[in-house]
Image: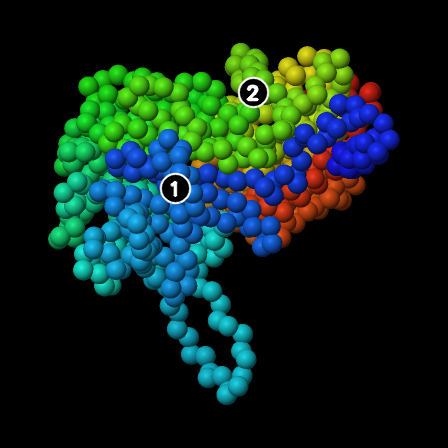
Amino acid sequence: MRKLLCCAFVVVAAAVAGRPVRAQEIASDTLLTVDHYLDWEQVVDPQISPDGSQIVYTRRWVNKIDDKWESALWIMGADGSHHRFLVKGSDARWSPDGTRILYFADGEPKGTEIFVRWMDAEGASSQVTRLTEAIAFVMLVPDSTRWSISLPKAPEGAKWTPAPRVVDDLHYRQDKVGFTQQGFTHLFLVPADGGTARALTSGRWHVGARFDGLAFGAGYDWTPDGRTIVFDGLRDSTWDRQYQVSRIYALDVASGAIRPLVSRPGFWADPTVSPDGRTVAFTGADSSDHTHRTADLWTAGLDGSGLRDLSRTLDRDPDNLRWAPDGKGIYFTAPDRGSINVRYVDLAGGLRDVTQGAQVVSLTSLARTLVGVGVRSDPEHGPDVVRIDLRRGQAPTRVTAVNDDVLGNKRLGRVEELWYTSTGGTRVQGWVVKPPAFDAAKKYPLILEIHGGPFAMYNVGFSYMFQNFAANGYVVLYTNPRGSTGYGDAFSNGIDHNYPGPDFDDLMAGVDAVVGRGYVDTTRLYVSGCSGGGVLSSWVIGHTNRFAAAAVRCPVIDWISMAGQTDIPLFTFSFFRQAFWDKPDEWLAHSSLMYVGRVTTPTLLMTGELDRRTPIPQTEEYYAALKIRNVPTVMLRFNGEYHGTGSKPSNFMRTQLYMMSWYEKHRRSVTEAATGAGNR
């Protein structure tokens, strides 16, 4: 299809020179190609000033020379006026009085440092150690394992091989990091008079709630009087063997004394203190034997008393917790059936919607004027900064338009919601993206794209990937099969200790539902997905031959070897009731590799060379088996990529183009398609 588009541009040039141009010939000018991705921009983490007058946010764009994303802070009035570049950096936070912002930027001697910028006319910036206020932050304290041996001294000038890496922790690597530096994350404080940062916590444990040992920072907050910091983490030396276990603690800044605020078994995170300093809100769920648990929004007194679950009836995961300025309730976001909207829970009881509709909205900051900011997207609009007036309950107001230059004249594919019935009477939600010039009387190739996780959710936000497929003439189907979040605990646990399982039924029922509409070319059905989508796309082609080709990206195909290769070993073990050395048949029965003998589908395999989450040996195992069986297959090893194949702009474009090129090479005969449709 890429070649066809190039040809269309040539036809237009010739037509302009010699005769009138028909509309269909110039339509290619209005299609969203991979080329436009180089001009795509992202908005992240908007923060509104305490008085509600200004918004600062992180803006990201493609560095076309160095093939990476660059970041800078931009600022504007709360109504979107006086929109301008502020400073190189990211992740800004306002001081309580609104006179300064704290942000990250490249500093001295090298690497990312914390800076503060005064928001007066001078706009002076300084590194955090020159501040006049105390600031808390989290930092790694190195703690390497030493092993001394009596090695003879190397002769002068010798170039001996470096000593081996000593590894004695279960978690010693992380995707997008590589081998992790040994040590423990702890809270530090920059004193009011400047100088060296002072450690507030210490020991062989971590500040920061960790999912299977992964370091993603920490959730912490100050009490208004500055005397106490509440934080999440696990003050336990057994952290390396704990899966989804964390606590909430309170730290007395003056004495360094730490006491548990929430210590019941469970995964508790993201504490935030009420305006009066008496109550702490946080998210979490009690420990469970289930592979997945939907979290709730909880509160407790600063002394740990009065623990309450405020969102038990919601059955959706809360996020972006923001206390109302009067302290009577909490604003938050929650995913629900493909949408994410803002909600409010009253401490006196009762939940209500603040925003509604088929959209994805975050709430990243809230002013004392009860005006919030976040990022909003929907199927036709890319993410932009929005202002949300919580006093009036109005729809979010867009205050940036960072991609209007890209999308302004583009014909986008129409996105239609789809509900259908799968096995056991389960109702499943999905969406269909149609080509911009869709004609129901024609037949189109269909791509089934499967999300990762598996405990995740496709949402109704704008998808460059899907719109690019549609612009190239494909119908795209994406669904939320069982295991997806946003539909309640029972639905996400539909694959509890059975993954893959009924989610396969849900995916095939979705394909059947779209094929039944009459506009799909059944000789050109394609399936793809990354991570959890790689698990299921490899599983699909081992259980049906209805697809003409597959693009299996960053898959898990062998759960036993995955347990020793991945940076999330405990997550891998959680899918099975017994370890593989006790009950290997269960592990093998859910591994795509065990069904490779059934595969006839031409398969493109795509994985990052640096992937630590679903490491490339998983792809290599599957590739070798397919090759031995003479199934048409190609392996693409993406340079410079960890998990996924599109973090670098050029690799995102390559991913799109390789997939469509592979699909163009393969179609099934009418007879094969007919028999394949019923083969499950």
Q: Residue at x 58, y 17 (%)?
A: 416
Q: Which mark is residue 75?
A: 1
Whether residue 307 is visible: no
Q: Position of residue 214 (x, y in %)?
A: 41, 47
Q: In this image, 204 relative to 169: left or right?
A: left
Q: Secondary structure at mark 2?
A: strand
> 10 Å neighbourhood of mark 1: few (<14), some, or many (≥20)?
many
Figure check: 644 above or below 435:
below
Q: Secondary structure at mark 1?
A: strand
Label 1 is placed on what type of residue? Answer: Ile
Q: Quadrant of residue 506?
A: top right
Label 2 is placed on what type of residue? Answer: Gly
Q: Residue at x 72, y 27 (%)?
A: 27
Q: Position of residue 376 (x, y in %)?
A: 45, 29
Q: In this image, 322 relative to 7: left or right?
A: left
Q: Position of residue 611 (x, y in %)?
A: 55, 49
Relative depth, front residue between 538 and 430: 430
Relative depth, front residue between 73 and 650: 73
Q: Position of residue 290 (x, y in %)?
A: 41, 30
| Residue lying furthest right | 18
Q: Which residue is mark 2?
A: 430
